[in-house]
Image (cartoon, helix red, strand yellow):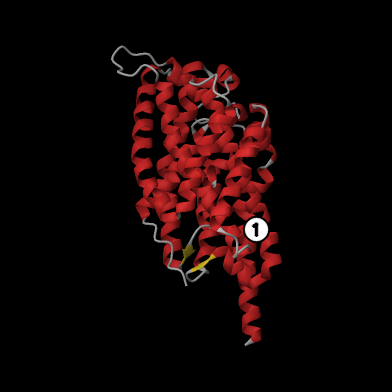
Amino acid sequence: MKQPLSVKRYEMIAIQMLYAGASAGFIYPNFIIQSTEGAYWIPLAIWTAGALASSFLYSRLLARLDGGNMIARIQSALGTWGASLLAAPVLLFLIIALVIMLRAYTEMITMTILPTTPISFLNGMLLAPAALAFAGMMPIVRAARIFFLLGFLFTFCLLLIGLSDVKWVLGMPWMRTNGDFLRDKGFYAGSFLWMGFAITSFIGTYTRSSAQSAWKSYAFSLLCAFPFIASYIYLPVMTFGRELSQRLTFPFISKMDTITHYWLVFENLTAIFVSAIMFYLLLIMALKLHAIGEMMKIFMPRANKKILYTCLSLIVYAAATAIPSWRTVENMILLTFGCRFYVMFFFPLLGMLALAYGKKKLEAGE
């Protein structure tokens, strides 16, 4: 039996904070700013509660594994076809999430610092996370420790600098909302930001104690990430106002472009922010690729690992390169909400039912 996933609390916090940074800085603000005329922190708080609920369900499922892998245990309980049926939406979500993340980031690069560079060339950055995913989970964890220190150091400094020229009155209302975001598709499209714990649940093996430790680390990382996520939304609003911010494709990056102080050593803060985001993206894409690879190896145990990861990388690269425009990226995020909702809430519930069924069947066989 494999040893339980040996990810320490600090490492899990680093991974989850990197996941938040990889999603919140350039895709997420546009959806939330357009979703409501009330206080922005309220929909953030609702999704935070949803993320905690989802992660709690996964922690209960992981606690039942007794040192095993989640998909492998479900396969032993339901058989290959039953486990494949449950896992198919998860695999679809992970592949689409990889494609969207890669294409969205390269689109941001072309809009900001490399406007003449072909998307097909920029998508080649997938090679680095593919190599990291192939190396295994512990190299990803070690990279997370380094990327977390570098990425969030730059991000924290940029957020502090961004506070220097805002008008706080533009952030109003601070406490009022009429729930209009519940009727807006952008609120639901932003669900991708809150799925960090679900992704790590599909990698490695867990015991009751390691599952509990992982959930506590995730809850702590959510509390730490909340001010960063709120800053990505409020800083552009308190600079441009609500109406103009709603028209911007990348509100926070536009905010970075407006910062000019005579005492700054580096003038192009946008390039620094885009570079910091790259630390987040490389790690999270590697994590998602590794999760897909680990799941596929369970269903195809005889598959060559090198060929498997090469094929996965080529599929993601080809799909990301084939996307014609940013509007298509946004539509993909909007249309795949149902798949994300399944992964967040329904899969852990079905997984627990599957394990209970397998245990009952085993006892009946005895």
Label 1: how many residues lie within 10 Å, few (<14), some (14-19) or many (20+)? Answer: many
118 displayed left or right of 160: right
Residue 363 vs 346, above or below: the answer is: below
Q: Nearer the viewer, residue 108 or 128?
A: 128
167 displayed left or right of 91: left
Q: Residue at x 66, y 84 (%)?
A: 364
Q: Nearer the viewer, residue 151 or 296?
A: 296
Question: In the image, residue 277 lies at what x, y percent?
Answer: 45, 33
Question: In the image, residue 27 lies at what x, y percent?
Answer: 55, 32
Q: Name the residue type under label 1.
A: Ala
Q: Residue at x 66, y 79 (%)?
A: 361
State the image quarter where residue 324 is shown: top right
Question: In the image, residue 47 lies at what x, y percent?
Answer: 55, 43
At mark 1, the secondary structure is helix
Q: Is residue 36 visible?
A: yes
Name the quadrant of the C terminus. Answer: bottom right
What residue is pinned by disc 1? Answer: 87
State the image quarter where residue 274 is shown: top left
Question: In the image, residue 180 lies at what x, y percent?
Answer: 64, 32
Q: Is residue 27 visible?
A: no
Figure label count: 1
Q: Residue at x 31, y 17 (%)?
A: 264
The residue most toward the bottom is 366
Q: Residue at x 41, y 18 (%)?
A: 166
The residue most toward the top is 262
